[in-house]
């Protein structure tokens, strides 16, 4: 997609959405400050901005950006108070979640269960350095499949419960599209939950070959270490975290905006440490280079992320379908695209046979996979679950497209 086409699409957006994109970052350079100042700030719909920023998970970033760049005198007091309240509520909530995270990691370590931390907690500790800047709905950890039951017992000892019997997951340690279990407290009414993974694939990839290419032992071996309050923990290596966040953001249609911001802030904070040759090569080894390409392309187009010259060219797919273009264009314009990531993923397959296989696996997963998707015991999975999956998916995306 040409640069002038990107600029044209951005100009078509609401000025309020442009303002949100400009401010959704930790650091704003002088050039971006001038762009923000050129917007008719007093005339913007600030009620829309506050609501939309909260929906996109970036209201706290906006609040800090406004304060740090002396825009508070221009922003209406009511809007500023709304953003401020959001930040402090998020700060209070995340402090509680991080305390539960630290307590849980300590017990898991005591039981000699190895854990990899990623997404929310890892990003707050390594990138944002402020627990009030990024919302968290869960605590994401990765364990080895053979440690899944033991990790579950630890979480049960802390008062959390899974909605399905972990012992029933025994036929293999990789499923085609869902590899995680959620542990809730108080019958799923708790403010947050633990999301325990045993593989990085938690949404159906466009090709089943990708699942076979991903060597989880390699990911474990290359994991990095961090420390918080004296507690040592492990997380993805830098290159694996970049690749995973790209996969995760694509799978969620790059919604909310904070998913793109996560990638941007990780790159900005680790700019001197990123070996792009390693990132590109590893993405190709894992079969995830298309996800990385689209995510980096959107980062450059939406947030002006500084990506070294040549990186996108080396990742650019030989063939880009009409549906992939439509999907990316919709993200650039900040508008929903009915079944966008599904159409894009479907089109990434090279032939009719692969596309049919993708649709069949998407709509009719194996019973064990459906049990994990629905988070219920395998014995309770029936035809109603398959019908509900189709109906729910249609109604969910239909609502999103309206």
Image (cartoon, rainbow, N blue to C red):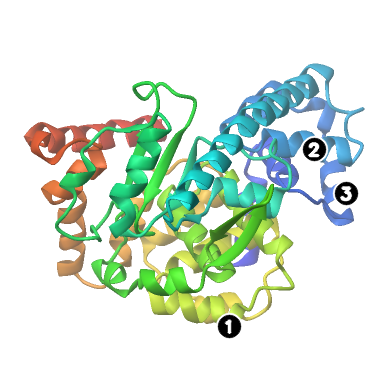
Q: Earlier in the sequence, mark 1 or mark 2?
A: 2
Instruction: Give the Cα distance between marks 1 and 2.
Output: 34 Å
| SS label for mark 1 | helix
The quarter of the image holding the N terminus is bottom right
Q: Please name the residue that numbered disc 3 is placed on.
A: 34
Residue 89 coordinates in the image, percent (x, y): 67, 24
Q: Earlier in the sequence, mark 3 or mark 1?
A: 3
Q: Give above or below for 183 relative to 268.
A: above
Number of the front mark, 3 or 2? 2
The quarter of the image holding the C terminus is top left
Instruction: Give the Cα distance between marks 3 and 1.
Output: 34 Å
| SS label for mark 2 | helix
Q: Please name the residue that numbered disc 2 is placed on.
A: 64
Question: Where on the picture, by quarter, is residue 56?
Answer: top right
Q: Is residue 316 visible?
A: yes
Q: Is residue 360 left or right of residue 92?
A: left
In depth, the one of 370 and 23 nearer the eye is 370
Badges 3 and 2: C-beta atoms under 8 Å apart? no
Q: Earlier in the sequence, mark 3 or mark 2?
A: 3
Residue 230 coordinates in the image, percent (x, y): 68, 51
Q: Please name the residue that numbered disc 1 is placed on.
A: 277
Number of the front mark, 3 or 1? 1
Q: Is residue 130 left or right of residue 256?
A: right
Q: Give above or below for 264 relative to 156.
A: below
Q: Give above or below for 236 relative to 378.
A: below
Residue 375 coordinates in the image, percent (x, y): 25, 37
Q: Is residue 170 left or right of residue 1?
A: left
- Residue 135: numbered disc: none
Residue at 78% of width from left, 20% of height from top?
Answer: 81
Residue at 48% of width from left, 44% of height from top?
Answer: 107
């Amino acid at each position: 997609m040409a640069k002038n086409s990107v600029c044209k699409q951005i100009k078509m957006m609401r000025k309020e959405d442009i303002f949100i994109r400009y401010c959704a970052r930790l650091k704003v350079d002088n050039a971006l400050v001038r762009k923000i100042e050129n917007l008719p700030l007093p005339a913007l719909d600030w009620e829309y901005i506050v609501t939309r920023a909260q929906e996109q998970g970036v209201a706290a970033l906006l609040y800090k950006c406004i304060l740090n760049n002396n825009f508070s005198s221009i922003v209406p007091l009511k809007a500023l108070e709304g953003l401020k309240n959001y930040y402090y509520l998020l700060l209070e909530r995340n402090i509680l979640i991080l305390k539960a995270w630290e307590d849980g990691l300590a017990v898991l370590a005591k039981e000699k269960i190895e854990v990899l931390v990623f997404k929310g907690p890892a990003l707050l500790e390594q990138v944002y350095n402020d627990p009030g800047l990024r919302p968290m709905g869960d605590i994401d950890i990765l364990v080895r499949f053979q440690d899944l039951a033991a990790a579950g017992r630890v979480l049960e000892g802390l008062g959390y419960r899974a909605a399905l019997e972990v012992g029933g997951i025994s036929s293999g340690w990789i499923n085609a599209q869902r590899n995680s279990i959620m542990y809730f407290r108080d019958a799923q009414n708790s403010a947050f939950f633990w999301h325990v993974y045993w593989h990085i694939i938690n949404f159906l990839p466009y090709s089943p070959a990708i699942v076979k290419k991903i060597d989880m032992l390699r990911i474990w071996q290359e994991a990095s270490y961090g420390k918080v309050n004296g507690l040592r923990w492990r997380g993805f290596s830098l290159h694996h975290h970049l690749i995973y966040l790209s996969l995760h953001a694509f799978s969620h249609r790059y919604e909310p905006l904070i998913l793109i911001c996560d990638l941007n802030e990780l790159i900005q904070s680790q700019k001197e440490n990123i070996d792009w040759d390693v990132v590109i090569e590893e993405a190709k080894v894992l079969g995830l280079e298309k996800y990385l390409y689209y995510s980096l392309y959107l980062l450059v187009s939406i947030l002006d992320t500084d990506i070294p010259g040549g990186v996108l060219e080396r990742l650019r797919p030989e063939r880009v379908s009409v549906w992939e273009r439509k999907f990316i264009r919709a993200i650039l314009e900040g508008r929903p695209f009915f079944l966008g990531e599904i159409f894009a993923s479907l089109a990434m397959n090279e032939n009719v046979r692969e596309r049919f296989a993708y649709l069949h696996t998407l709509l009719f997963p194996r019973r064990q996979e459906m049990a994990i998707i629905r988070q219920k015991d395998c014995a309770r999975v029936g035809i109603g679950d398959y019908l509900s999956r189709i109906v729910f998916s249609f109604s969910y995306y239909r609502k999103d497209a309206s």
